[in-house]
Amino acid sequence: MPTTCALCRRSIPDERIDDPQVIQEHHLRPERRAESPTVDLCRPCHRQIHALFTNEELREEYDTVDALRDADRLRDYLAWIRTTEKLDIQIETSDHVRERR
Ligand SMILES: [Zn+2]
Ligand SMILES: [Zn+2]
């Protein structure tokens, strides 16, 4: 059964999941991991989310997949990632997130 990324909705075929890092579990409420709902994301989506949003923003504004999918900051990324089969991309942490680490 292929795994579907909850964010970009790309379907990742089984033969590409030999690398266990390709699908990652994202905790929708990062500061309460134990009780947080989780979603399966492809590696680029997961890394992109954490590069663009602080844990505080994730907790307060983006704690559902729908909210993430509608986020302005993700729009260009999502439009692009859906056009490729890449599972490895260059990600730069935004200044916005870096300043708050
Ligand atoms: Zn994805
Ligand atoms: Zn995460």
Image (cartoon, rainbow, N blue to C red):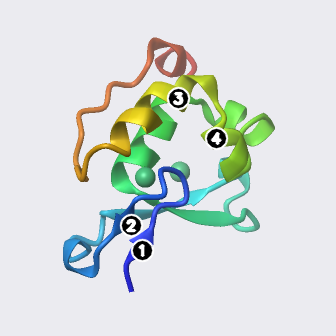
Q: For numbered disc 1, what is the local secondary structure?
A: strand
Return the residue at label 3: 75
Q: Nearer the viewer, mark 1 or mark 2?
A: 2
Residue located beneath label 1 in the image = 3
Looking at the rendered structure, the kind of residue marked 2 is Ser
Work out whether residue 33 can be spotted: yes
Q: Residues within 10 Å of mark 2 (few under 14, many from 20)?
A: some
Q: Is mark 2 on a helix, strand or loop?
A: strand
The residues bearing labels 3 and 1 have C-alpha atoms spaced at a distance of 22 Å
Cβ atoms under marks 3 and 1 closer than 8 Å: no
According to the picture, the residue beneath numbered tag 2 turns out to be 11
Mark 4 or mark 1, which is nearer the start of the sequence?
A: 1
**Where does the image place residue 47, in percent across and percent down from the top left?**
40, 43
Q: Is residue 101 visible?
A: no
Indicate the position of residue 3 as horizontal and vertical percent values: 42, 74
The residue that appears at 20% across and 79% down in the rendered structure is: 15
Residue 69 position within the rendered picture, expressed as x and y whole percent measured from the top left: 61, 41
How far apart marks 4 and 3 lie (CA) works out to: 9 Å
* Residue with the mark numbered 4: 68
- Which class describes the residues within 10 Å of circle 4: few (<14), some (14-19), or many (20+)? some
Could you classify mark 3 by the number of other residues whose Cα lies within 10 Å: few (under 14), some (14-19), or many (20 or more)?
few
Identified by mark 1, the residue type is: Thr
* Residue closer to the observer: 75 or 47: 75
Of circles 2 and 4, the one toward us is 2
